Image (cartoon, rainbow, N blue to C red):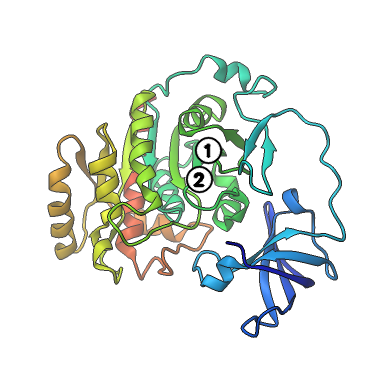
Amino acid sequence: MVRWREGTVTAVKRRWAGAVELEVALTRRDPSDPPSVRAVAYPALVGDPQAGDRVLLNTNALAMGLGTGGYALVVALPDRLPPDPPRAPGHVVKARYTPLQAIVLAADEEDSPHRAALAGATELDGLPVVTADLHSALPAILAGVRADTPTARVAYVMTDGGALPAWFSRTLDALRGDLCGVVTVGQAFGGDLEATNIHSGLLAARHALRADVAIVSQGPGNLGTGTAWGFSGTAVGEAVNAVATLGGRPVGSLRVSDADPRERHRGVSHHSLTAYHRVALAPADLVVPAGLAPDLAAAVTAALAPLTPPHRVVTVPADGLDAALRALPVKLSTMGRGLDADHAYFVTCAAAGRHAAALAEQRS
């Protein structure tokens, strides 16, 4: 299950919040092993690697050629173990019963500074929450919120369908000043706040981070098997249910594309259709931008017709969204396609953000 390798750090390269990229010379165990690999270490888990350190690696993602991964992962620095962490509050364990399980302080634990705000919190009070399938939607949705309401407080709630450490996301690092906080829920960890599940994570976004708008998606690394139900994005429908249960306003960001080479993801992706039609039990606003190419617009309309009711299809003006997307401090990319290569996808995400911002304005 794990492709183990060891090697020696030859160079410390890029750093971003919570992670460091390395070049590692491999001790080759197989003729197919390359002489060196790119690797990522999370210093909070394994210590801070330096040139010359021997490292133990998990090379599964690299060997499989995973597009999001592309890295070996540092499991340990066996000759230079980090010091024990200082005694700290918190008893919530994430990545439970794996070798690198982490102990964190949940936002609603007794020792948390947010305990008072969250102890009796049971409602979102109408908070607009945008639900999305892919992590790549996050900056585009944020651009849509910022297009009309640049001062809105936007929180990101990261579910555990993709990467578990929030530190893996360079997108989050680039957006750090544009979000009022990141809440990692379920088995995900490394956010500004930790939560046990999507419900407590949403409440933390509303009552601890005081968000005007929340965005929910998995971390980087969507999982899919090419079957009707075998994909991690089913959690989108579960997020809609959680938002509605807590008295929030679900806003569905649709995965729309006329550039994806796979038929099941053209028009409205079957991931969105399954999550909103088969998993979501509560109604959501499903947002479509005005001005899509005629053939794509017709395909989207036809695909969404069986979802209404219970859902509501909301058409949102797209004026200014392209400029807002291009002004982002992060390079947009989904499945290897940038803004110009898959424009409809990113504009659709941004339109969902614009709609959520309008709902937030009405709420205030």
Q: Horizontally, is 130 left or right of 69 in the view?
A: left
- Residue type, label 1: Gly
Mark seen at residue 160 = 2
Mark seen at residue 87 = none
Q: Position of residue 200 (x, y in %)?
A: 50, 28
Residue 180 in which image quadrant: top right
Do residues under tags 1 and 2 come within 8 Å of each other at their CB atoms? yes
Comparing 207 with 33, the one in front is 33
Q: Residues within 10 Å of mark 2 (few under 14, many from 20)?
A: many
Q: Residues within 10 Å of mark 1 (few under 14, many from 20)?
A: many
Q: Horizontally, is 195 left or right of 295 in the view?
A: right
What residue is rendered at 52% in x and 59% in y? Answer: 330
Assign the N terminus to one quadrant of the image. Answer: bottom right
- Residue type, label 2: Asp
Residue under label 1: 186
Examine the rendering and report whether any part of residue 319 can be seen: no
What residue is rendered at 45% in x and 18% in y? Answer: 122
Q: Position of residue 267 (x, y in %)?
A: 22, 60
